[in-house]
Image: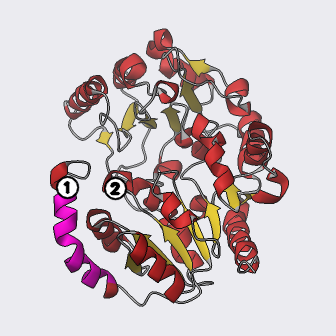
Amino acid sequence: MAGSATGKVWNQVQAPRFRSRARRSGIVPNGAVALYFATGPENFYQFELWRRPLERLADLRPVFVIVDRPDTGERVLAETSLPVAFARGSAALEELVDDRDVRVVLYVNQVESNFRMLRFADPVHVQLGHGESDKAPSVSNQHKAYDLVFVGGPAGQERLGSGLRGFDAAHRAVPVGRPQLDHDYPGAPDWARDERLRVWYAPTWEGDRPSLAYSSLVSHGLGIVETLLSDPLIRVIYRPHPRTGLISPVHAAADRKIRSLLAQDGTRHLIDLGSYGWQWKFADACVTDISAVAYDWLATGKPLVITEPTAVKAYRPRSALLERLPQLRAEDAGRVVSWLHALGLGLDQPAKDGRLVELARYYFGDTADQASSRRFAAAIEKAYSLGRVP
């Protein structure tokens, strides 16, 4: 409904009612940090990735969320304790920014509607993104529009500094690690720990342009899943991207086929459509594509297999991760189990792979003992201290 004419009409009709609901969600604080989330509910996962770090940040600085659509706003209200402000249109946004003296504005995506907020010079504008990655959107000229860009670690600073003309990465790209790793996440299935191994297959979506065609669903997916299913000592956690099939019916069909295969085996496997984050501790290994999932998994030090995209025009970034770790080709999908065992898959895990430890530090810096959360809070304070434009 979100992208249809029916959805637009629904949002228009519901706007007055939702405005009242948003006002009851809590007092929108003055001089606060605002998350600007002006997009459809199909992108809610982007907000969910930052929800816990922002709720923790609210213990130090007042934080609230700005939405411009009732359908998205209802999802946000249902999932967070943060106050929600509804600003539909430029006039409402201007009134909110002025009346509430918004000091810092955070963004978790690069949607066009961000520019409605970016036109205000006084707040400090900070791009968070929704995942560490070497993909093309991580080196976008759009990053220049923000006062600061929070990145994971040295990799992000180097990526922006070398990829964007005139971008002073030393001052504008601030490393904060991955504060998401500092939280516990609900949603794990009630699986007894036995001799069986838990393999997480998390393909990305098909992308909305040829350069972002990284998904392995059609090229590798069936071969990977059938091979995993053939091993009685493996349980599969299959997590398709929330946007899977939005652009490509072929990918939607591949997703349905894999779900059907997994469902045939009762409760042995899991089709994971819920929250994100619990998989890091729960799974023993990860098979994924060139996506933020691969980079998040790095910090676990557990076996990681990344697929090689088959699309001719898929952008192949310069990437320490992809240069250090071989990618699984489509013709080798049936060998995924042997790849995982070669990387140390097993209950008695060997010492963490030195390559992964080194890469994790390059992409996220120190992530031990809540270090990312402390750096994130310090980076917010830096943004806040920049003050208003004279």
Which portion, as a residue range, is magenta?
A: 8-22
Q: Residue at the right extreme? A: 170
Percent position of residue 276, x then y: 43, 53
The mark that comes first in sequence, 2 or 1, is 1
Q: Residue at x 46, y 16 (%)?
A: 333
> Is disc 2 in contact with disc 1, using a CB cutoff of under 8 Å?
yes
Q: Nearer the viewer, residue 164 or 338?
A: 164
Horizontally, residue 318 falls left or right of residue 311, namely right
Percent position of residue 135, x then y: 60, 35
Q: Which residue is mark 1?
A: 7
Percent position of residue 130, x then y: 53, 52
Horizontally, residue 151 falls left or right of residue 334, namely right
Q: Residue at x 50, y 12 (%)?
A: 332
Q: Which residue is mark 2?
A: 40
Q: Secondary structure at mark 2?
A: loop
Task: Give the answer, above or below, for where 342 lies relative to 183.
Answer: above
* In the image, residue 36 lies in the stretch drawn in magenta: no
